[in-house]
Image (cartoon, rainbow, N blue to C red):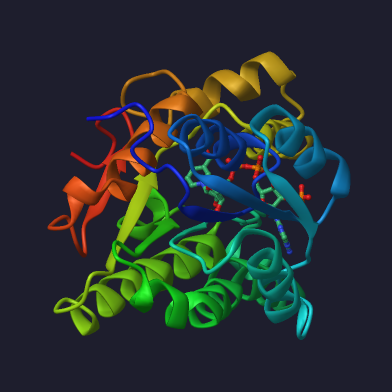
Amino acid sequence: MSDRALEGRHALITGGGTGIGAAAAIELGNAGAKLSLLGRRMAPIQHTAVRTGGTAFQCDVTEAGAIEQAFDEARAANGPIDLLVVNAGIAESAPFHKMTRESWDRIIGTNLTAAFECARAAIGDLLKSENGRLVFIASVASIRGVPYAAHYAASKHGLLGLSRSLAAEYAKTNLTVNAVCPGYVDTPMTDQSVARVSEITGRSEEDSRGAITNMNASGRLVDPDAIAKIILMLCLPLSRDINGAAITIDGGTSA
Ligand code: NDP
């Protein structure tokens, strides 16, 4: 495999400023891809853009019309989209009987409805590309239930259904559609979960981090760079027959 296997290809990553999205940007950028990085906050996407030579586009994927506008701006800067990594996501937690409709709508809106809209906004380009690639960052919560996060698990189960359905629908084309399903990863999202657990239980941050880390069967957090390597692998032309997969990177949690 050439070190620059993605030379000149346009990769758009949502939530590209932090965590898994930033790790993916570095990996795809090192392989030669032209990067468009989307996020709500300008500072993180700009920071990653400077590190990778990419371009940052402010975009709240839940705002009406924002995805179409940002994707158009990205196309104007970097050409048609060859690789789309749908990564932007949020997590919240609550016992089910206290889960509010607002929280449900926020989670489903960001993790599922916006993912549908991103895929729809790029599908024309992806189908025209010689090796179109659509990668959804799903979760171990796409294949297992999660206590205190029914909305999150529902959104991620839905995301996997979307991914597999598109893989089946476009199987005869040059586009592949796959889902990556991580366990708990060492990113800002997990830091926020630690803070929430600490607040709810009154336990120390250290204890709460230990409790979350132990939710992975391995007893350690997943390294975001490991997920980025899998995303790169899925984006390579050689991976054209990996389609409709749900790749777990969870230290054995779903085994
Ligand atoms: P981060 O919180 O670091 O990344 C989430 C990214 O999504 C941020 O860059 C954030 O940008 C962006 N984002 C959130 N909401 C919006 C929005 N409305 N519009 C645009 N961008 C938005 O955590 P991770 O890297 O861990 O999360 C990335 C993905 O991985 C998520 O889909 C998550 O569900 C999934 N995942 C994470 C796991 C974990 O343990 N951390 C486990 C399994 C899956 P900004 O900060 O600017 O809003």
Is 140 situated above or below 63?
above
* Drawn side of residue 255 relative to residue 221, left or right: left
Q: Nearer the viewer, residue 140 or 130?
A: 130
Q: Residue furthest top?
A: 206
Q: Can you see residue 222?
A: no
Q: x%, y% of residue 93?
A: 64, 53
Q: Is residue 27 above or below residue 136?
A: above
Q: Is residue 152 left or right of residue 54?
A: left
The quarter of the picture where residue 160 lies is bottom left
Q: Nearer the viewer, residue 72 or 102?
A: 72
Q: Position of residue 217 (x, y in %)?
A: 31, 27
Q: Position of residue 218 (x, y in %)?
A: 32, 21
Q: Residue at x 34, y 65 (%)?
A: 132
Looking at the rendered image, the quarter that the C terminus falls into is top left
Q: In the visual, does 123 lie left or right of 74?
A: left
Where's the N terminus, which quadrant? top left
Report the label total.
0
Give x and y (percent) for residue 22.
61, 36
Q: Residue at x 76, y 32 (%)?
A: 50
